[in-house]
């Protein structure tokens, strides 16, 4: 079975504006979640796929897909072989671990290993 995309995260410099746009355009519901690193907007995308919006000081907003993997360290090593760089080393959160990769010929992608 292929590793599924389980989460889409919008990284933006304006959380309120992004929330207003996407909830009006698609009817997605949003809920502010307060975290130690700042506010996070959880999005209900109307499917099994989860979503969210995080605020960053970047000039350009972008979507970051999260792919669920069974073994985060093993997946990182597989990605490094063809030259991907790790832009966010593995970090533990309340529900699992995540890491972000930057492949040579593509956009960033996040890996997600849930806690069992």
Image (tube, rainbow, N blue to C red):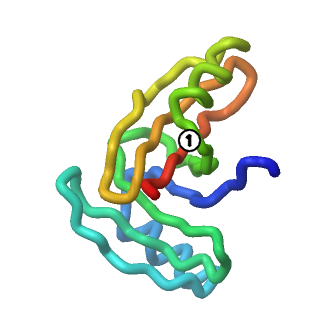
* Number of disc labels: 1
Left or right of 26 on screen, residue 15: left
Q: Where does residue 28 sit, x and y in percent of width and height?
A: 56, 82
Q: Residue at x 71, y 54 (%)?
A: 4
Judge the density around disc 1: few (<14), some (14-19), many (≥20) Cα neighbours within 10 Å: many
Tag 1 residue = 111
Q: Residue at x 49, y 74 (%)?
A: 43
Q: Where does residue 1 sit, x and y in percent of width and height?
A: 81, 51
Q: Residue at x 73, y 13 (%)?
A: 82
Q: Residue at x 48, y 54 (%)?
A: 114
Left or right of 38 on screen, residue 47: right
Q: Vertically, is 43 above or below 103? A: below
Give SS at disc 1.
strand
Q: Where does residue 17 sit, x and y in percent of width and height?
A: 42, 68
Q: Based on the displayed image, in which of its 4 quarters is residue 76 positioned?
A: top right
User: Which residue of the protein is positioned furthest toward the front in this rendering?
Assistant: 116
In front: 15, or 82?
Answer: 82
User: Which residue of the protein is positioned furthest toward the left in this rendering?
Assistant: 36
Q: Vertically, is 56 above or below 94? A: above
Q: Where does residue 12 sit, x and y in percent of width and height?
A: 44, 52
User: Which residue of the protein is positioned furthest toward the right in this rendering?
Assistant: 1
In front: 105, or 14?
Answer: 105
In front: 110, or 12?
Answer: 110
């Amino acid at each position: 079975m292929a590793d599924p995309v389980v989460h889409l995260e919008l990284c933006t410099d304006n959380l309120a504006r992004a929330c207003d746009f996407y909830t009006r355009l698609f009817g997605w519901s949003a809920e502010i979640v307060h975290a130690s690193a700042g506010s996070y907007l959880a999005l209900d995308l109307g499917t099994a796929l989860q979503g969210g919006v995080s605020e960053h000081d970047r000039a350009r907003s972008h979507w970051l897909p999260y792919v669920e993997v069974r073994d985060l360290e093993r997946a990182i090593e597989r990605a490094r072989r063809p030259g991907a760089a790790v832009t966010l080393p593995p970090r533990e959160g309340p529900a699992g671990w995540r890491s972000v990769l930057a492949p040579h010929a593509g956009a960033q992608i996040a890996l997600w290993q849930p806690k069992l």
